[in-house]
Structure formats: structure tokens, C-alpha cells
Image (cartoon, rainbow, N blue to C red):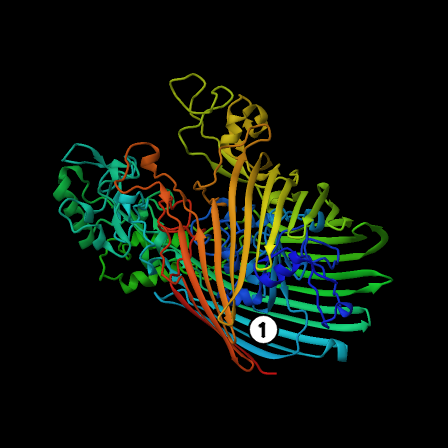
Amino acid sequence: MKLNKLVQALALAGLSTQVFAQETTQQTDTSEADVKVERIRVTGSSIKRTALEGDLPITVFSRADINAAGITSAEQLLLQMNIAGNSSDNLASNGGIVSEEQRGNNGVSGANLRGQGSDATLVLLNGRRVATHGLKGRSVDLNSIPFAALERVEVLRDGASAVYGTDAIGGVINFITKKDYTGAEASAFVDHTEAGGGNIFRTNVLFGTGDINKDGWNVFGTLSYKKNEVLAGNDRDFSTTFQPNRGLSPDTRGTPFATVFNRGSSQANLIGTGLIDPLDGQSVTAINILDLPGAAGCETGGDLMGPYDHKLWSSESSRYACAYDYPAAARIQQPQESIDFIGRATFKLAESHMATLEFVASQVDVSKAFEPNQISPGSTFGPDAWYPSTGESYDAIYNALSGYFGADQLNYGERIAYRWRCIACGPREIDTTTKAYRFLAAFEGIITDWDYNIGISRASSESDSTLGTGYHYTAELQQVLGSGLINPFLLPGQSQSAAGMAALEGASAYGVKLYGGESIMTQIDATFSRELNFSLPGGNIMMAAGVDLRREEFKFNGDERAELRPVFNAPFDNANVLDKVSRDIKAVFAEVYFPILDNLDVTLASRYDKYDGFGSSTNPKLSFSYRPIEELMFRGAFSTGFKVPSFNQLFNGVTESQYTGLDLADPATCPGGVADENIAGCERIQPVEIFGGKEDLSPEESEQKSFGFVVVPVDYFNISIDWWEIERTDTIRSAPRDVLIENYDLFTANWIRNGQGDIVAIDRRYINSGGTLTRGIELDANLTGELAGGAWKVNLNGSYIDTFKSKGIDSLPYSENLVGEYVRYYNLPIKWKHTLNFSYAHGDWSHSLTQLYRDGYNDELPVSVRNESYVPSGWDPKVDTYVTYNYSVTYKGIDDLSMTFGIKNLFDEDPPFTAHQNDFAAGAGWEPRIADPRGRAYTLLVEYKFM
């Protein structure tokens, strides 16, 4: 078979980053007549074809690409993909403070293509589904993928519900392992940071025996171990929130050396309802004696302490308070240990029939930890827990306060109400263990010109989270605090008493089971494909058809304490217990390939899915490729997609939370719902808000469009550009309060009233409402040549986001474009990302130099800038671009030995500064959705083949 110029040029370019082909060919002889073509099935299609250039944009990462980049996990690979969204899908982003939707995602790393979310990106292993993570059951945990055993990763940058069903809105990532192997090899990898902390180690062994063609069978297995060492926030100088001149300062007065607080007239305490500043007569309600005029200063009170920026937070009554850098106290890189195994046995049953047994298993241990608990004089810890009115520390506090404010303003002999960061309690730690497996039996071959592939599999992901340090039983902790054995007013160098530490230890909840869950999937699938005896001018029509039967099961154990004693600030989740809910899915699908002309191909696909509980969904797809001249190919696709509600969204228990704000009014009598006591009907209300699952939810729906072209003007250069659009409707989300207010007439049932017509509750459970619109362009260009006897290649791969909009309900227009704007929690839609790579190979040596570029964006406004009360002198509304360079060199001059040395972040570039509010996002002065905090690192990979 003669390859055209476009295909030959792509082959010369290496196809290491961009694949325009649906197939590969294997040539066993130099003569064209003896070419043997192997039909294969690639991600995004059920048809086995032999055409090299296809109508769907697919990106392929080979094993060599992954090794050259020093990538050791699927999470790292996603962070470097330009087509991946910038969301809270990595362990750094969900290590500390997270949104409601992320709670319970302990230890999870997700795949998120085109910013559609990890629950709208389908993850496959060798072309088939795996179980979603056991704690929430919403997305596949990338940490459970056997990464060291991968041969390549195929990424379909297009919707694929017509082929795969639910969740394939953003695209599909197919992790493909070795199919057979003979011999033995071992590898070891180290990724060591120059600044210390966050080192990564991995080792892998692989053994296989049996030749399929000679023996009729092959068996191989690979075992891998990986360890990520902890990287703490205060291990990096840039990770600090004490940058008030730039608009960033921590909003907490819970400090290692406690801040004295007022508690109102009903609770007697040392400072009563507050003190009057003798300088200006203003009220002061939070005082740290280290920050009083003439005192030593907040920085002397302990690590990560500094002054509370009352101007930035518009809190004048706290001008003598201190703050604690709690975001920097969180772990940037969570310590992780994982072990995974994949075993595969392949048997030739007959000349054209094969059977495969595959078993994949992994265990991943992850430990997240963030700042120690803040002890506040609120409802949890009343006056009995305040600091007793005796002893040297009490007198020191009294003397310092009376020396400035005057003794007549103090209540000597009353306990001290305080806010304190309990360093002695230890950081709050949650340890999560995830055990996952998949067993697969598959049969494939040819029966009377029909290619068949039949499989049966069962997969599970079971996770358990356990409390580590930093958590204490509430009643016992209150007793310890009130006893005076623990002193919240200690300076560096001073230690808690042995009796106090023993008392804390006795109150510890270390080892208490937080919650656990399991996600199980059982699947039977069959696909049949062949060339039909109908031809068009471009060749024979090909088709595929199949069935997919699945059962998905999920359980969430909730609170599993042996004794139901309250634990202070522990995120137990007993309201959402699910006792093994399940659903059955039955699907049929078909795909037909029409070679209408020699240079025009059209593919039609459709899939029908029926879900027990909420009906069915039919999703078609139309794609084409057109080559008007040999050097140019156009391609495009249109499809629909869908995403079914998760078990949590359907069945979560109902929880109630009291609305405590002072700004809400009845929207029926007060348009806009803004409270104003001077306007009739706008009186303040404080109803209960109801959250939880709803069983009447419908699937989300989507439309995907794409159009692009591939140009190969000469053999040594090619470029592709693809435009795409994804519009989602009926999106599932917890009902936003502002949407319920602004569209009161549509959501009157969500405002629950008593017999007198007064609002007593707001139903904010999950709803189908509104949608999102995202558009972008993806670019890939390759230039190759020869130099000094070697071969070089330049590749540019980039992603441009043009539109990122949302709306609360379908009838509303879309919001303003959020591209280039800061977005909390979810996808951060930066405009441009690219990877520019130069590689050179000569003899036994190969080099790679890569630039990673991430565009800047408009930062979140500090509170004081937002309310126009104060603008810090160094405030810059723009977050800088983030550009790093990686270099690697590989040597293969010794038989059976390969060594790759690399330098990541060659110029040791710090993440760009951002002033985002840390109560709503991880990262202390930097953005973990964009940047890598590890700094310059040195990598070494050694691979040796024994046989």
C-alpha cells in the first residue's frame, strides 16, 4: 500500500505529540507488494481501519516522551498537557481548603480535558472503563493507573458519547499498557529537588515469557513501587501569605501566641465587650499583646506569625491583632506511597483467535495535612475552656493590657477569652488508603470476515480515610483547655508542660475512622467490525456494532467511629451514608465509515444508553476528513454527549445549615432579596438552607463541534489547527442562592414557607439548571531536519481558550466571558498554554529541551479593593505568565542499558504571585492549578534488560 505525502511527512515528524492517524502499518518487506497491514482499533472509534490519517484529533504520548520529560505519574502527565483544564484535580490543589464539591476527594487526582471537569472526562485502561474512586464515585483516580507499565497514552480531544457513553464530554484518555512481553528488565527513577523536600522515587520490574507466534502463548507481569516525599508549604520562600503590600494577608487571628478576644456582655471575661483605644477612642475587640504599641511584634510569637492586616480585611477593631500563615502550614505535595501490579496472559486459541486474561491491582496511601486547629471562644468551647485567671501568664497578659488600655477597662479575675492556633495539637492530618483492581477476560479474532472483541470485567476502588494527628475529642479537649494545663500564651523556646501534653494525648482521636466507600463496576461488552460488500468510489464501506452491559455499584460507609463521641472540627459525613446503591446500564452502538471519494471520508456513529432509574439517552456523531490536495486535509465533527448524575448527586442525605447572614430578604416581597429594614417587605430573614441529593435529576447534555485542518507543504514540516466548541445544558449543581433569588418565579417551590407564609427554609439540593459554553483552538506544528549526522525536531503544541461562559438557567443569556479571569475552585480558564520542544538524536545520544508556557490572568480582587476602602501600594491586578524549561539527555551506548538524566525547571523559576483569598483556595501566594512548587529538580532514570 502506497502512503501519500501527508502520511509520510507525519511519520517522519515522529508523531510523538500529535497523531492524525487512526492506524499504524507494519512493513515486513521493502517491496510494496509484500506490505503486511495490521488493522488496529484506536481511541474514539470501534472500527479497525488501515487508513493512517483520520478525522478525529488524537494526541499520543509515547513511553519515550514520558521518560524524556521525567514524568512519573498520570497526574504529572495531565499537569503538562496543554489540552487539560486548570482545575483542582491534583493533590496540591485539594490538599487544604476545598469547596463543598471537593470534600471527600481525599487522595484523588483526576483527569480534566478542555476544562469540563474530571467527572466529564472519560478515563480508559486498555480501551475499557475502570471503577471510579471509592470515596465519591465521581471520577477515576489517576493514582491507581499502573503508570510504569504504560506503552503509550492516547488522548481523544473530542466528545465521544456516541462510542463510549456517559462522561466523555471533554474527551477520552486511554492508558495503554504493553500487550505482551518476553524477557526481563528493571528500572529505577529518582527526581530530587535542589531546595529539598518533595523528592520522588520509583522502581519497576518486568518479566515475561512465551512467544505468541511460536509457543501460542505469552505471560508477563510488572510490579512497581513509587514514593513521593512530603513538601511542606513553609519549605518554599514564595509560599507565604504575609505580603500585605501586594494585597495578600491571612484572615485569621488564631495564632500560636494567642489573641485575646471579647465575648459579649453575657459572658464575663477579661476585656468584656472590648476596649477603647486611648489614641483615638475607637473600639478594639481583638488584641495580641505582642502587637501593642512598643511591644516586641507579632513575628516574635512563633513560626508563621505576623501582623493582622486590618485595612486589607476592613476590620479596624482588630488593628492590634496578629495573624498566622495557615495556608503556608499546609502540605504542598502530599506524601504518597503506591504499589501497583499488572499481569497479563495471552493465548492463541486458533490461527485467528486470541484469549487474554488481565489483572490490574494497586494500593495508594496518601496523607493530607493542613494547619493545626484554631481554638475560638465560641459555642463549641464556652467559658469553661477559657484560660484560668491565675498564674504568671494570666498576670503577664493583664499587665500588658492594663499598661496600654488602663486597668479600669479590664475585669481582673475573670477568665481570658482567646483565639489560639493549637500548635501543640499538631497539624490536622487525614490518611487515605485506596485499593483498586480490575480483572478482565477478553476474546478477539476473526469469524467470517468479522473482527470481534468480547470482554467481561469487574473493577473496584475501595477507599478509607482515617484521622491522623491534630484531632481531639471535643469534650476531653475542652476539659484540658479549661484546666490550665495547656498554656496558649507561650513564646518560642517555651514548651507545654509534660502534664499538658499527656492530657492532650489522652484526648487524641488519632486513628479514628473518618469514612470509607467503594465503587464497583461489572461490564460485559462486545464489538464486531468488518468491511462490507458495498463499495464507494473511495473504497469499501466499513462498519462496527456492539453492545455494552454494565452494573455500577457504590456504597459510602459514613461515620465509622467505634464510639460516637464528637471530635472537634473533624469532617465526618454521616448524612451521606449510601448502603450499596446500584444501577444497570444497557447500551447498543453502531459506527459506519463511508469512503465517499478517494479524498473524502465520512463516519457516522450513534449509541443508545438506557439507565435504570431515569431513562435513556441517544447520542449521534458525524465526522469527516477531506483532502482536496495531497498536502492538505480538512477534518471536522459534530456530536452530542451526556453525563449521568453521580450516586452522591442522586442519593446524598439531606442536611440543614442555618443561614446566618444579615443581608437576605424574602424575594417575593423584596425584588433582589437584599435586606433593608427601612423598606417594607425587605425585612431580614435567616432561614435554614437544605442541601443533599435528588433522585429526580436528569443527565446533563452537551453538543460538541470541531473543525480543523492539517497542512504538509513539505516533507519536513506539518501543522494542524483545530477549532472546537462544547456547550453543556441541564448542568447538575447545588442550587445557587443567587439563581434562586434572581429567578424567584421559576423556583418558588424552593422557598419553603410555614402556614403564615413566612420563609423557613431554602431548598438548595442538586438541580438541573443552566449550562456552560467553552470554545478554543488547538495547534500542533512539527519541523524536522538533519544536523552533523544527527536528526533534530521542533514541536510546538498549544491550546487557546477563546470562550468560557456560564448561565444559571437556560432562558438566561450567558455571563461575561471568564477567559483570563480568576475563578475559584474549578477550572481556571487561562487564554494560552503551549509546549515548545527541541530534540536532537545522534548515535547513542538523544537530547530534549522543552519550554512550558502558561499565560497570565487577572487576579482575584482583595476584599478591601473590592469594596473600594483600601488599595495596597504594591497591588497588581495581573498574575504573571509562568514559563519553565526542562532538559534531558538519554544514552543507550551500552548493551541492554538505557540512562536518562534530566533537569526540571532549568532556571529555578518560582510560581507567579497571586493574591487569591486563601479561605477559598489552596496555595499561599501561588496557584497550584497552574504552577509546580518543587523548583529545580534533577532526575535520573536507569533501565536495564536482563534477558
| Residue 561 can be seen, yes or no | no
Considering the numbered disc 1 on the image, is that residue within a helix, a strand or a loop? strand
Q: Residue at x 48, y 62 (%)?
A: 838
Drawn side of residue 463 relative to residue 315, left or right:
right
Residue 646: % across, % down = 62, 47
Residue 234: % across, % down = 33, 58
Residue 402, above or below 25: above
Q: Residues within 10 Å of mark 1 (few under 14, many from 20)?
A: many
Q: Quadrant of the C terminus?
A: bottom right
User: Where, by quadrant of the figure, is residue 700 drawn?
Assistant: top right
Task: Find disc 1 in the rendering and name its residue.
Answer: 223
Residue 211: % across, % down = 72, 78
Which one is in front, 482 or 374?
374
Which one is in front, 480 or 945?
945
Query: The disc labelled 1 sits on which kind of residue?
Result: Leu
Residue 789, above or below 116: below
Residue 126: % across, % down = 66, 62
Q: Quadrant of the N terminus?
A: bottom right
Residue 8, above or below 165: below
Drawn side of residue 775 relative to residue 525, left or right:
left
Drawn side of residue 504 relative to residue 466, left or right:
left
Which one is in front, 258 or 104?
104
Which one is in front, 398 or 111?
111
| Residue 783 can be seen, yes or no | yes
Residue 918, above or below 351: above
Drawn side of residue 244 relative to residue 684, left or right:
left
